[in-house]
Amino acid sequence: PLVSMTDMLREAKANRYAIGQYNLNNMEFTQAILQAAQEEQSPLICGVSEGAARYMGGFSTVVQMVKAFMDTYQITVPVAIHLDHGSSFESCVQAIHAGFTSVMIDGSHDPLQENIAATKRVVSVAHAVGVSVEAELGRIGGQEDDIVVDAAEAMYAIPEECEQLVNETGVDCFAPALGSVHGPYKGEPKLGFKQMEEINKLVGLTPLVLHGGTGLPIEDVKRAIEYGHAKVNVNTESQISATNAIKEFFDENPDKYDPRKYLGPAREAIKETVKGKMRDFGSSGKA
Ligand code: G3H
Ligand code: ZN
């Protein structure tokens, strides 16, 4: 069934595992990710950025596509469709109107008070219709779609501000930027575990969200789960495995042209990557 993230993340935090948010980029990603979740019997969060939604034909088209494949594959695990890095109140409302069951309002580029005010507004609309909300503080490095943050701009979330935002807004989950990066890491990832532990104490039962799941050593992810993370976002790693499968195909078959011949193996590669993450994060068998 299509559900919000609220219950699945509470369960995950209480039982110390994390649910992956796997980003949709096109039809093959949608098929692969839904099938992976069903095969692993894992709860699932489908992440959709504004850019990816535009590419696929808009919020409503994405919702209809996900629903259609859930029907086709007889998906029985809980699935949330989540707006990733929503840039404004308006964008979140549009996603909710189109049938998204969850939204992220990313006010992390704004001053704290503005971030809190925008997040509050989104929470009041979302909660009225059973939709869950994620907020962010600090700045995640790297690039995702339209959002580019260079190393100098990347910022660690401040624990007291996290406590204030979570308490004042009533968000369902919260992403403190603590050194994680969108896209491949340059050098070794250095997550701020000290702040993480402190933030987790300050936010109580509220599940934390780890962005930039690609390229993080499994030990780091496990430690983040110990410190309250119940959601880990993965996009680039699925993209890389899909593209590698396509490159491999053309190395061996430079003259082929039927897209099904190379998108099929790409889809298979995404599915295997996602299934591996579900086992790593401990969400397999938790549906
Ligand atoms: O919001 C999406 C994620 O944070 C994805 O990060 O592409 O580095 O896996 P990633
Ligand atoms: Zn992110």
Image: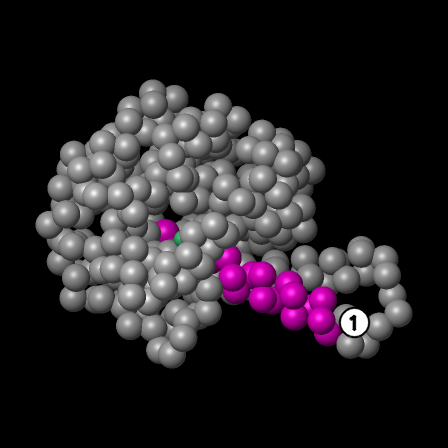
Q: Is residue 269 magenta?
A: no
Which residue in the structure is indicated by mark 1?
250
Q: Amino acid at mark 1?
A: Phe
- Percent across and percent down for residue 84 are 44, 44
Query: Going by the picture, which residue comes out furthest to the bottom?
Result: 187
- The magenta region covers 230-248
Q: Main secondary structure of the magenta part?
A: helix
**Residue 129 falls in which quadrant of the image?**
top left
Q: Is residue 80 visible?
A: yes
Q: Is residue 239 above or below residue 96?
A: below
Q: Is residue 44 above or below residue 276?
A: above
- Percent across and percent down for residue 108 are 29, 47
- Residue at x-position 33% and y-position 67%: 151
- Percent across and percent down for residue 272 are 60, 63
**Horizontally, is 182 left or right of 252 in the view?**
left
Q: Judge the density around disc 1: few (<14), some (14-19), many (≥20) Cα neighbours within 10 Å.
A: some
Q: Is residue 67 visible?
A: no
- Residue at x-position 81% and y-position 60%: 261
**Residue 116 falls in which quadrant of the image?**
top left
- Residue at x-position 44% and y-position 32%: 91
* SS under mark 1: helix
